[in-house]
Amino acid sequence: MPEPLIGGAAATPVKDVTTASFMAEVVDGSFETPVIVDFWAPWCGPCRQLGPILEKTVRAANGAVRMVKLNIDENPEIAQQMRIQSIPAVYAFKDGRPIDGFVGALPESQVKQFVQRLAGQGGSSPVAEALAMAKEALQNGDHRSAGAVFSQILQRDPENVEAQAGLARALIAGGDLAKARQLLDRVAKEDAGHGEITAARAALDLAEQAKTAMAGASKLRARLAADPDDHAARLELATALFGGGDREAAIDELLTLYKRDREWNEQAARKQLLKFFEVMGGSDPLTISARRRLSALMFS
């Protein structure tokens, strides 16, 4: 059992506060972690629109910033002291004082910028550090350690999208495809389009395809030896190679297929390459070199 890396009991990044708890939760608490205060009321339509977006964005900050909600109908004193005249009103506190804020329901893109700006002032959180550690372990092929850390993060924050995707990848790397599928199927609908979740799903799809193809890899090679234009065999072989960890050879096979017949099966070679790129990540050196090779073929 690995030692806990990110503290003990789970911490809730979003909670309700009252006038009585405002000083401890917001003013005092902001000396440790920046705190966002959402001033709202049940009758306020724009508040209901902004609140979920703000909460989702704060959770995605992985502990680098906290958020509290204050119902001004039940707790009017703080709003009066801060001279809040309309809601929703959002204020960010750091080191005991308000440092930023906005009024009204902003678009999600602007809310993200607001939260990210504040999170950057708060420094690295334990969860962010643990995520970085787990991702590095996964990249280095240590899927057991990575899976253990991702699991710890999810115990603390069950809705952490990056940890969900990371644990799924660790399970895929360990060959537990069924458990990875179950995990990804439990991801909240609003997070289904997150880049790391879609990449994990692509990795799972490829792993499932590869599991089937690898069983017949020798037959696929024999088919290609007999007929180099057996495009279906080459596509299956590329998938098997990728699933087996020979990514460079897999990419070579797909580029060969694309060169021989780029339009075959509705450009299946290019589409499979794009899946490979999504799984490997845009910054992977192999992704970068393969993209260049593909571009050279596309415009030759």
Image: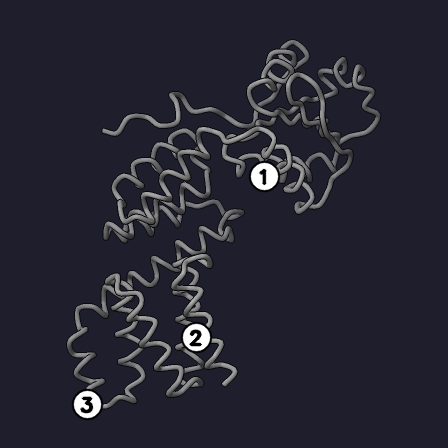
Q: Residue at x 64, y 27 (%)?
A: 36
Which residue is disc 3 drawn over?
Answer: 226
Callouts 3 and 1 close, C-beta under 8 Å = no
The location of residue 248, given as percent across then percent down, is 31, 68
Labels 3, 1: front one? 3
Label 3 secondary element: helix
Q: Give the mark nearer the N terminus: 1 vs 2.
A: 1
Please name the amino acid that badge 2 sits on. Answer: Arg
- Alpha carbon separation for disc pair 3 and 1: 55 Å
Which residue is disc 2 drawn over?
Answer: 293
- Alpha carbon separation for disc pair 1 and 2: 37 Å
Labels 1, 2: front one? 2
Q: Residues within 10 Å of mark 3 (few under 14, many from 20)?
A: few
Q: Residue at x 36, y 58 (%)?
A: 203
Callouts 1 and 2 close, C-beta under 8 Å = no
Which residue is disc 1 drawn over?
Answer: 57
Label 2 secondary element: helix
Q: Residues within 10 Å of mark 1 (few under 14, many from 20)?
A: many
